[in-house]
Image (spheres, grey):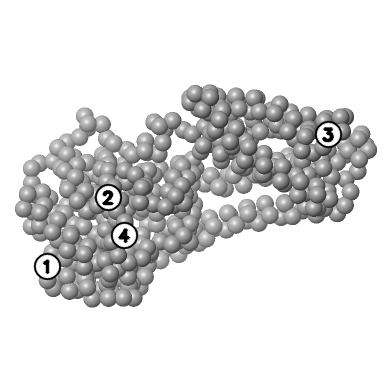
Amino acid sequence: MSAIRFILVGILNTVVGLSIIYAAMYFFDFGIKSANLIGYLVGLIISFTLNKKWTFKNRDRIGSSLIRYLLVIGVAYVANLQTVIFFDSYLKISPYLAQFMGVFPYALIGYLGCKFFAFPEPADATPNSLVVVAPITSMKTRPKQLLNLSVVLPCYNEEEVLPETNSRLIELMLDMKKNGLISDNSGVYYVDDGSRDRTWELISKFNAENPCVHGIKLSRNRGHQNALLAGLFSAEGDAIVSIDADLQDDINVIKDMVCRYNDGYEIVYGVRSSRKTDTFFKRMTAQWYYRILKAVGVDLVYNHADYRLMSRRVIDCLGKFKEVNLFLRGIIPQLGFPSTVVFYERNERFAGESKYPLAKMLAFAADGVTSFSVVPLRMITWLGLFVSSASAAVVVWILLGKFVLHTAIPGWTSTVLPIYFLGGVQLLSTGILGEYLSKIYMETKQRPLYFIEEKI
């Protein structure tokens, strides 16, 4: 809804601004730069007030909001001006049509900048509020008995880090058994996701040395989510903790998870308390990722990956989902049940390389959106409506220029550019439809998610 309100404010601001710009150029012979400056200054107060109070409902102080808003508008104005100059100077189209083309980068930069920088959501509306915590009145403390706990770790080419991971986990499990937190038959389950190195060899060695260590070998690489699911459905125990094998997640938090489970919670999410170890690029993209998913209606736990504890009842309910396109971070919150979080500091990777390069991260992010939201499909409708309205406005302006202002738009670009623009919109829309169609195609096949080659 904020995007729709922003568009409505933008339309009002554009009508006022363009009217002043065109009047300045036509009646007073102002140049493009001067006319743009005058038009935007006039619409600045109107757009700031409406966007702050109505579009984004921001409660920050006017002074700080205005400074941030001016920075966003400054960037958007530069993008707009460069677009206008490019079309006017290099493509030699009418300055009036050039003004119209400059609206698009201005609107895109303006909306994103206002939503995430100038008028951010208040602290109590951040994605942290997505964590579902059951009221304390509904909780039933579990009877005092030792918990049969299983820890599941998906592994793909982890031979460098696996010895250290296993050593720390075994030490942790022995400590929890000694302190009466878990039972003696609790264990660790490694899932080899078709590794090409010595991962399975090491898992077999760990099993020979310690019977509480188990191994599940998939027939081929099926991806992190499928490997994780194979471990969850194969592991025994009253509760199961899933965690990556790279030691970036603090394994000592498992003790807190067990305590929360004993308090009556069915799901305990491991949530990062900060992103200090991330690069600036990864930190910013991650924050935007969670906000975008929240904006399109995907229920996620902010700063949570796949580090969580789930009870046996939750695992049984998870088994009723038959989806091929897995996105467990979105599925788990849909299960309901009493839930809570434990916070921890994320460490640097102990050894080896990340198995999630940028391309996989982008694909995973796209899966999260397309698997749980139809907003992109609805955006096509709004985009089509906007383009149709804009095209009609261009036609009206061309007729107005020819018969009233007597300034016919010269050159082939006035014809070719709208065709290219509409073609790009159509290709983008077709791509979004194709993404959803491919998911339907995969779901209808109902192919098995994985095959287990060997278990120890």
In the picture provided, is 346 more to the left or to the right than 189?
right
Q: Residue at x 40, y 66 (%)?
A: 447
Q: Which residue is mark 2?
A: 308
Of the residues shown, which amino acid type is indicated by label 3? Phe
Q: CA distance from mark 3 to mark 1?
A: 84 Å
Is tag 3's residue or tag 1's residue first in the polypeptide sequence? 3
**Helix, strand or loop at disc 4?**
loop
Residue drawn where x is 68% and y is 54% of the image: 424
**On screen, residue 26 above or below 394:** above
- The CA span between labels 1 and 4 is 27 Å
| Mark 1 in CB contact with mark 2 (< 8 angstroms) | no
Which tag is nearer the camera, tag 3 or tag 4?
3
Dot 1 or dot 4, earlier in sequence? 1
* Label placed on residue 181: none
19 or 207: which is nearer to us?
19
The image quadrant where one finds the N terminus is top right
Residue 199: quarter of image: bottom left
Kind of residue at badge 1:
Pro
- Reading the image, the residue beneath label 1 is 211
Q: State which tag comes first along the sequence, 4 or 2.
A: 2
Quarter of the figure that contains the C terminus: bottom left
Q: Which residue is mark 4?
A: 349
Q: Earlier in the sequence, mark 1 or mark 2?
A: 1
Q: Which residue is mark 3?
A: 30
